[in-house]
Image (cartoon, rainbow, N blue to C red):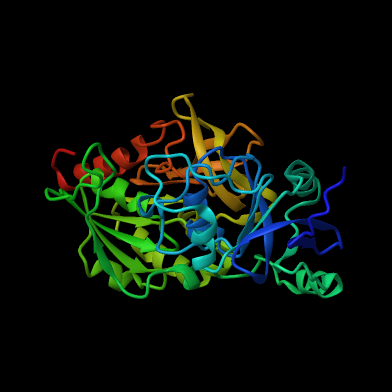
Amino acid sequence: MASTTKPTACLVLADGTVFYGMGFGATGTTTAELCFNTAMTGYQEIMTDPSYAGQIVTFTFPHIGNTGVTPEDDETANPFAAGMVVKQDPTLPSSWRSVERLEPWLEARGRIGIGGVDTRRLTRAIRQQGSPHVALSHDPEGNFDIEKLVADARAFAGLEGLDLAKDVTCAQSYRWDEMRWAWPDGFPRQTEAKFKVVAVDFGAKRNILRCLASAGCDVTVLPATATAEEVMSHNPDGVFLSNGPGDPAATGTYAVPMIKDILAQDIPVFGICLGHQMLALALGAKTIKMNHGHHGANHPVKDNDTGKVEITSMNHGFTVDTQSLPDGVRETHVSLFDGSNCGIAVDGKPVFSVQYHPEASPGPMDSYYLFERFAAAMAERAGVSA
């Protein structure tokens, strides 16, 4: 017998396609770009990752909400993803770490969810047609003006040409000394730092900062709009360029000049995700919008220097154009899914970056060596042991 339950949420694509389901979390309507994420765990980290600003996330794994939420897993204070789409309605949490269910957590933070959607069909559409612009609406009464929602989706400006780093960056500088989680005491504090690092916050995740602290760094975080003079006023041993959302070319209008000036100082530089793209732009390369991007925790990446394959976590809709890399900049890592660029390094200088997220540890520790490499570069420059 067909269900008589009236849908309380709908996802409307700009081409007029409508997916109905059951809403949870906040009520109302939001517009964004739609992407899909293939990770089997980490929905809370995904929702609070600033790199998802301006996006609604379709989760291909059906069991979302089954571990609840805990403040320890927040990558930032609040979610930046605009909403979530799932196959099954969130289940009751079954985890000793859970302190709250997913639904009220989303509601308190103004984020909309929709369950009961055919996420396989939706994912196929994204893969074939590219990431669509959508409107997501949740109304407990099930009243939807589909014509208006289609118009709202079509009116969404998209991410190309959009600088979102200014929206997600910190308002002022701060120090960070919390290290990676360790049993049984949680997050220890860094009390014996060897290196001073300035992290430029284009949308930094907490776990990246924890990895830097665990690698022996005394971390000072500066806003995305920081100038080279402001960065160098802290007399850093190295500079870190963080992840973040939006079009790298748009953020690059103010970030690229700063990075170029930093590169002239001949100090170690390490970039991740948007920071990787910012570094590439500063070195003279170009970035391009991908059809549907890379979002997941199962992406194989080959290290061209060693031949080793890492299982990585990714979240990006833009990529560095390998063909545009200038002389003296080499491709260090490549995606084994589609051959897209996943890392660069400057010949003869301690300057490197990767497109993926080494702090997310799906391998689980395949990529932590990058933080150690950064620390080793700072140690070599300072003439001390790492």
Along the viewing direction, whichever of 145 and 120 lies nearer the viewer:
145
Which quadrant does the N terminus fall into? top right
Q: Is residue 108 visible?
A: yes
Q: Position of residue 240 (x, y in %)?
A: 35, 55
Along the viewing direction, whichever of 247 and 140 lies nearer the viewer:
140
Q: Is residue 48 left or right of residue 72?
A: right
The image quadrant of residue 334 is top right
Q: Position of residue 56 (x, y in %)?
A: 64, 58
Residue drawn at (79%, 62%), measured in percent from left and top?
A: 12
Q: Is residue 94 left or right of residue 198?
A: right
Q: Is residue 264 visible?
A: no
Q: How many marks?
A: 0
Which quadrant does the C terminus fall into? top left
Q: Position of residue 339 (x, y in %)?
A: 64, 36
In the displayed image of the protein, which residue is found farthest to the top? Answer: 307
Residue drawn at (82%, 75%), measured in percent from left and top?
A: 148
In this view, 254 is above or below 3: below
Residue drawn at (66%, 42%), measured in percent from left and top?
A: 60
Q: Is residue 173 left or right of residue 283?
A: left
Q: Position of residue 295 (x, y in %)?
A: 59, 46
Q: Is residue 248 left or right of residue 360?
A: right
